[in-house]
Image (tube, rainbow, N blue to C red):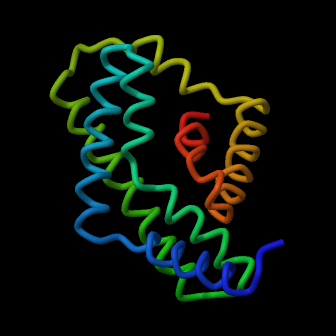
């Protein structure tokens, strides 16, 4: 159980990382470029690197925190950041797709296109691990592993 001052600090930290600023847009764009190139190349390592670069963990945690707190402003900020991040990823990947019209989907692309129930379980467990690690500074170093999962 977190002490009150730790909960306040956590809420402030998550809130600060939930808004889309210039750094968020730049890092999301670079992550989308990395992911697009990694998928086209069929490189799992580059795709994982893109996941680590993408700044979506903050807004996702912010959305979860806002629901538990009933904080409409934080939810709105987080939702806008998530939508903007997804939009940037979509536009960047669309540009790469149009620039390479005859390109065949790689195995990496096909593997990402058929999620199943196990993928849902992985996503849920990863989300819980991220929320736990965010609230516990002594295990925050595991967030990179959570992002990879």
Quadrant for residue 24, please give it. bottom left
Q: Is residue 141 above or below residue 74?
A: above
Counting the numbered discs, the total is: 0
Residue plotted at (54% across, 72% down): 14
**Looking at the rendering, in which quadrant would you find the N terminus?**
bottom right
Q: Nearer the viewer, residue 100 or 36?
A: 36
* Relative to 4, 42 lies left or right: left
Residue plotted at (44% across, 19% down): 44
Residue plotted at (64% across, 79% down): 66
Query: Where residue 137 sits in the image (x, y, percent)?
Result: 61, 61
Q: Is residue 145 above or below residue 61?
A: above
Residue at the limit of the structure toward the front, as seen here:
138
* Relative to 137, 21 lies left or right: left
* Relative to 3, 13 lies left or right: left
Q: Is residue 4 above or below residue 102?
A: below
Residue at the limit of the structure toward the left, as seen here:
99
Quadrant for residue 121, please give it. top right
Query: Where residue 16 sits in the image (x, y, percent)?
Result: 44, 77
* Relative to 82, 136 lies left or right: right
Q: Nearer the viewer, residue 6 or 58?
A: 6
**Looking at the rendering, in which quadrant would you find the C terminus?**
top right
Q: Nearer the viewer, residue 146 or 41?
A: 146
Residue plotted at (44% across, 39% down): 51
Q: Is residue 70 above or below residue 19?
A: below
Query: Where residue 18 sits in the image (x, y, percent)?
Result: 46, 71
Query: Where residue 143 sits in the image (x, y, percent)?
Result: 57, 47
């Amino acid at each position: 159980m977190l002490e009150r001052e730790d909960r306040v600090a956590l809420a402030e930290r998550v809130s600060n990382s939930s808004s889309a600023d210039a750094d968020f847009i730049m890092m999301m764009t670079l992550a989308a470029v990395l992911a697009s190139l990694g998928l086209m190349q069929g490189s799992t390592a580059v795709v994982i690197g893109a996941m680590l670069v993408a700044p979506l963990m903050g807004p996702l945690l912010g959305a979860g925190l806002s629901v538990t707190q009933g904080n409409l402003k934080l939810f709105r900020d987080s939702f806008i950041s998530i939508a903007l991040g997804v939009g940037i990823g979509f536009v960047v990947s669309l540009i790469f797709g149009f620039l390479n019209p005859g390109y065949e989907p790689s195995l990496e692309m096909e593997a990402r296109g058929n999620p199943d129930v196990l993928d849902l379980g992985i996503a849920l467990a990863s989300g819980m691990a991220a929320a736990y690690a965010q609230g516990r500074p002594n295990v925050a170093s595991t967030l990179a592993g959570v992002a990879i999962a």
